[in-house]
Amino acid sequence: MSGSKVASMRDAIATLVCDGDTVAIEGFTHLISFAAGHEIIRQRRRDLVLARMTPDLIYDQMVAAGVARRLIFSWLGNPGVGGLNAIRRVTEGADASLELEEYSHFGMVARYTAGAANLPFMPLRSYFESDLPRVNPLIRPIASPYGDGTVYAVPPLKPDVTVIHAQRADAAGNTQVWGLLGCQKEAAFAARRVIVVVEELVDEAVIRADPNRTIVPGIVVDAVVVEPWGAHPSYVQGRYDRDNRFYRDWDPISRDPAATDAWLREWVYDLDGRAAYAEKLGQERLDSLRPSGSAPSGAVDYGEYR
Amino acid sequence: MSGSKVASMRDAIATLVCDGDTVAIEGFTHLISFAAGHEIIRQRRRDLVLARMTPDLIYDQMVAAGVARRLIFSWLGNPGVGGLNAIRRVTEGADASLELEEYSHFGMVARYTAGAANLPFMPLRSYFESDLPRVNPLIRPIASPYGDGTVYAVPPLKPDVTVIHAQRADAAGNTQVWGLLGCQKEAAFAARRVIVVVEELVDEAVIRADPNRTIVPGIVVDAVVVEPWGAHPSYVQGRYDRDNRFYRDWDPISRDPAATDAWLREWVYDLDGRAAYAEKLGQERLDSLRPSGSAPSGAVDYGEYR
Amino acid sequence: MTAGRPGTGGADAGFTKSEMMIVAAARELAGQRVCFVGVGLPNIAVNLAKRTVAPEMELVYEAGVFGARPARLPLSIGDPTIVTGATAVTSMWELFAYYLQGGLIDVGFLGAAQIDRFGNINTTVIGDYTRPKTRLPGSGGACEIAINARQIFVIMRQSARSFVDRIDFRTSPGNLGGAEKSERIRREQGWLGRGPSVVVTDLGIWHFDETGEMRLDFLHPGATLDEVRATLGWAPHVSASLAPTPAPTEEELRLIRDELDPEGMYTK
Amino acid sequence: MTAGRPGTGGADAGFTKSEMMIVAAARELAGQRVCFVGVGLPNIAVNLAKRTVAPEMELVYEAGVFGARPARLPLSIGDPTIVTGATAVTSMWELFAYYLQGGLIDVGFLGAAQIDRFGNINTTVIGDYTRPKTRLPGSGGACEIAINARQIFVIMRQSARSFVDRIDFRTSPGNLGGAEKSERIRREQGWLGRGPSVVVTDLGIWHFDETGEMRLDFLHPGATLDEVRATLGWAPHVSASLAPTPAPTEEELRLIRDELDPEGMYTK
């Protein structure tokens, strides 16, 4: 319908991400837009408030590169491997310089949901007898108007920019995902601006053939960036696997500030984008991440009704 | 995984719906289980609290048959045709005998959502300056704990029984729907007991081939009833069309109590179930409701990961 | 072609009052981007607009559809034809929470049983709420649409019973007691909606003036000011530059009669 | 086969302490219907249980998966293998709101950095919150799992640094200050969860007694009570009928070594 929103990653980040913005690159283990994170590093954005349930390696890299002033999160680790060492360096001891704003997973999800739904708060049954409300005054008790007790509330989170990665979208930004959905829908609806990065640009007819598969409509999308392998070392259901080797390799690199800087130089600053990154990874590495076989969903019939 | 929950409609209603229960037969225009409603009439349940966003013809028929004592709803009409005449007869003038508990659509959806999420209330931005909170004291103002104003809240709705109709489920009750989703997921999760009525019973492998299509997991389902045409005169995306002629024909029938009783006798009491109903409708009528063509969704690949 | 259609717009107008009303309502949608489609007359008006003045407009149905392209005019606002070929289908929770309450709807298009001069709407009861003379359908999504859609369009036939000095029940707020109060309350309570901006009837087109009251800006061909006043429960504001509504075009009539409503369900 | 695996369960036990811990944890899941799988050690314990004592158990991953059947053990709890062939994939909103908070989870299986005698858990910081000695991952879903899952299982290695008299931060509530207070608060505030019921370590199996404190019920082969006391910040309750944990079976060890963790990520 609307005009094409297809843009290069460089232009999308240059236009839509400003110094000081609250930026959410969302995707729970699945579909993490490392490509967007690297471009933000490359364009040397500063003072960003980075929101993500699981900061993961991408925010560890972004924090190491100095783009962030504050982190809003719920789980700060390298799953199955250990800690996020660059972030630990600026959050431990007397030198802690990165501001932390901490929730639980459901609290973060509820914050995005409240943001998407334009609600002043979202109630949830968490945080009872936990120290989290003590250290985060934005987690507040609220009494039920039906006299049946008190629960906790979290405030809406409305990022200036949300970036999500997806299997496919059309040029207007109508976006479809299968596999883990995380909180991308809520994070996108909650945001002022949305960048969708896709493995594949498809015709509008592909989207309209299966409207139940659409998670974000183009009307909330500002730019569509076509970036195959854009989620590596995260993964894309049906396309490529999680690169667990990379997650393990990052641990020793990130423990050493010099090694971290060298990695950023080699894999981010010195490359002009994701195509170069994929080429540098090499065909053999990419091939090793292909699924071991296909697992087709089957088709359903919506029926023609004239 | 679990044992089969497949049951006849007669047994499912006999076992799971009791006099005095709060019953929600949900489905917004799409997938309305007329088959379950008729079986409830046939088994002469009494004093039910009937919850439904749009009572539609099925609750008009159930109210006419005397099963209900109270209605919880948000829109009481025959869409595009007129009123629900049997319900109007017991809600207008001095003889009004049916209790009404009235919300807006979003209020009903929010009630089911609060029920599904085990929340004591759900906030929403509706009802400002409307007379609805005045006539329904369960719609209550609630102040944001962040000092940014007041919104309204509705209480959770937790039906004793929710009935939904779907294109397909497996024997354990894992249920998939495409087309309009209404509030069925929320109404099912909110309920103490759930009956799923399907056009087609499928192997577990069909469900597991496309897990993103599942709206209700078997773990919340108590009975799976296989009842082709069970939604007529409502419709099933991809299977059969809405029988608009029936919706129009109901208007004059329902205006006349004697004609209504005769219809209930002929189409409900005197038939032993949905198969007989479909046979009585006749092949020509059924054929006229088939989609004019097919509109396949296409398949996606989840990938095999070993 | 129009033989036998009652309530023609004028002696030889060649179209009915209902057709004029639907055409006028559709034209008001020119330039709108996202429209939330209500049940009944809004449904045909919006679908006509999509085929004429607003081909790019996204149709949102409360049943949970965004970007619908109905191949036929559905009788109900829930129908398989609004799903097939749509951009997105969502749960109603997401539709109301993220799309409507989230502020993505430019125009909410509603019908009404009663309306007052400030565009406040009753679709609940005629008479007393607990012992009503007539029990109407109720809010449906109208109450939250009136509050959260950026602006509200209304389409309804004019009559002394429906355009009243005092509505029996305020289902969906309009300009409350006038523009000043309405603006203050909307601002204080953080409503996204600015309120009603157009009421299209079978006699004319009303917009809202700076006091928040309806003002008659266009009079349909064949309608008279006397007729307008006789079907109104208050003394109307009439625009100093009151103009005649341009008659329906051949193409508009063809779309209504041949494509959208061949059985005349809406246009009788 | 076990050559080179450090930390064996005994001189010639033929299995490591970690293997014993994982096996013991898996066995505790016998008869459980729906288990919410936490990151790390819970992940391998639950996947072992699914292949042994609890084949019918439904695995729920907070990433939004119900009825997962992972063909391999994922390193992370989000992985394409937990999706392919699963019963249902949902948004995380629905997973946390409808499945967890809605009361469908029988067992929430968590890891921890620090735990006290009442099963209160710290996964947030070692030291002061604002100037921590060690910044840990934080809650993830643990806080709401601890409150809403019907019961909580914990798996973690014992050490004087982790089994402490006072945890530095209470991320996820256990039995608070004891059974009486915990039961009162849970009842008054309407928690669905009854709290922690099992803690499996590399030395033994703890359940909770009527005071709400951990009680050592099983001691793993090769472990001693002295070792238990030396890795604990308080004087433990020990069951009068303390029994040895049955050693891992060949099949359990084969599943861990050949299928679940061939690289020894969890069992080193």
Image (tube, coloured by chain):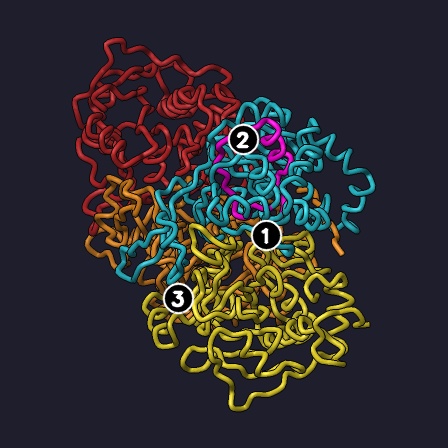
Chain colours: A orange, B cyan, C yellow, D red
Q: Residue tagged by mark 3? A: C191
Q: Is residue B45 left or right of residue A170?
A: left
What is the x, y in percent for residue A62? 39, 59
**Pointer 2 or 1: first along the chain:** 1
- Viewer-side residue, C19 vs B278: C19
Does B44 lie within the magenta span? yes
- Which residues fall within the magenta stretch? B30-56
Callout 2 secondary element: loop
| Residue type marked 3 | Trp
Nearer the observer, C54 or D240: C54
Question: Which class describes the residues within 10 Å of circle 1: few (<14), some (14-19), or many (20+)?
Answer: many
- Mark 1 residue element: loop
**Crowding at label 2, few (<14), some or many (≥20) Cα neighbours within 10 Å?**
many
Marks 3,2: beta carbons within 8 A: no
SS class, disc 3: loop
Label 3 to label 2: alpha-carbon separation: 39 Å
Foreground tag (1 vs 3): 1
Q: Which mark is residue B83?
A: 1
Residue at image x 58%, y 48%?
B28
Which chain does the residue under circle 3 lie in?
Answer: C
- Which amino acid type corresponds to the residue marked 2 in the rendered image? Val
Q: Which residue is mark 2?
A: B221
Same subunit, labels 2 and 1: the answer reads: yes
Determine the residue located farthest toward the bottom in the rendered image: C241
- Asked if badge 3 and badge 2 are on a common chain, one would say no
**In this rendering, the label closer to the viewer, 3 or 2:** 3
Q: Position of residue C143 (x, y in %)?
A: 46, 60
Q: Label 3 neighbourhood size at 10 Å, few (<14), some (14-19), many (20+)? A: many
Mark 1 residue type: Gly
Please report, as a chain letter, where disc 1 is located.
Answer: B
